[in-house]
Structures are given as C-alpha cells and as structure tokens.
Amino acid sequence: MNDQRRLFQQLFEDNSKKVFHLCYGYTGDADVANDLMQETFIKVWQNLGTFRNQSQFSTWIYRIAVNTCLSYLRTAKRRATDELNDHIVNNYTEEPSEKQEQIALLYKCIAQLDENERIIITLVLDEVPYAEIAEIAGVSEGNLRVKIHRIKHKLTAIYNSHERV
C-alpha cells in the first residue's frame, strides 16, 4: 500500500499541471478545470491497481482526463459558446496584463475548436510528445502532424478574427 501511495504521489506531481491545462482547454473555467483534474486523479487512485502497462502512465491518465471532461460536458448542459467565451475573458478579477489577455484570448479561441482538436492542441501546448498524443487521439503520428498543422491554421484564423474586433 505504501508503494502504491508513493507511485500515486509521483504520478500526481508529474501529470497534474498537464491534466489541469487539458481540463481548462475543455471548460475555459479554472475552478471547473481544477474540479475535473481532482476527479481525474480520484479515478486514477481508484483504478491504479488495474493499470495493465499497455501504455505509459501519462497516456492512461490523459485518457481518464479526456473521458472525465467529455462526461462533464455531456451532463452539464453547457451554455452557448459566447457565454463561455465571455466568462473566460472576464475571469480575471485584477486588471489583466497584456499577456493574460492574450492567454485568455487563446483559450477563448481553443474553446471554439472541435473536441478532438481541443484535445490535440492542448496536449501540444503542454509539450506532450507527438507519439503520446497520437496514441491518446487514436491516430498515426503522421496523421497527427497533418492534424496539428490544420489546427494551427484554424486557430490562427480564429485568433486573427478576434484581434480585429
């Protein structure tokens, strides 16, 4: 039991920030993302004994996080994208710096992407290796590179359309 606890602590330390960013990419809400990250790690703890070593721990954890986020989005009858985007932009209580505004705008743009595109680009932003992202997304690494290229172009177009406003 002690070994399992140490393993869990190490997994949490190694993966919690990336899982949070993934959840934030889905929700655009830091509080909800934090709740979903915690829910993900509760599931990791509960299922640690069933891990079959067929993939890396991080890949397994990302899959749990993605499923947790998708489940949340399905059951939580989400507001319209505009309301979500307004919340992201207005989430800062202090006067936001230019960098904070750009980050908020980036997440606002990411929120407009399809689910699979959000997963992929969030993992890219977290510098997850392409091989691992391909495994999580269920595509070949070559196909992943094409998808990333298209997502970046789409995201750039969305971002630029907001910059002109």
Image (tube, rainbow, N blue to C red):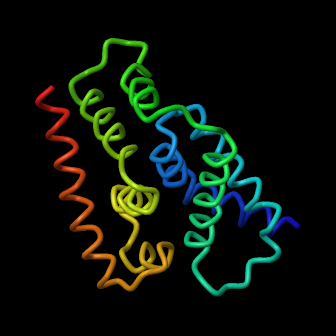
Residue for point 27% across, 76% down: 145
Whole-percent x and y of residue 13?
59, 55
Whole-percent x and y of residue 114?
41, 55
Residue for point 40% across, 29% down: 82
Residue for point 88% across, 67% down: 1
Residue for point 64% across, 49% down: 74
Is residue 44 or residue 28 the one in the foreground? 28
Q: Is residue 160 above or below residue 74?
A: above
Whole-percent x and y of residue 115?
46, 57
Whole-percent x and y of residue 122?
40, 55
For residue 42, side relative to residue 164 (left or right): right
Q: Is residue 126 above or below residue 134?
A: above
Number of residue marks:
0
For residue 99, side relative to residue 54 (left or right): left
Tell me where residue 8 sits by quadrant.
bottom right
Residue at the right extreme?
1
Tell me where residue 53 sits by quadrant.
bottom right
For residue 162, side relative to residue 116 (left or right): left
Is residue 9 or residue 16 the one in the foreground? 16
Quadrant of image for the C terminus: top left
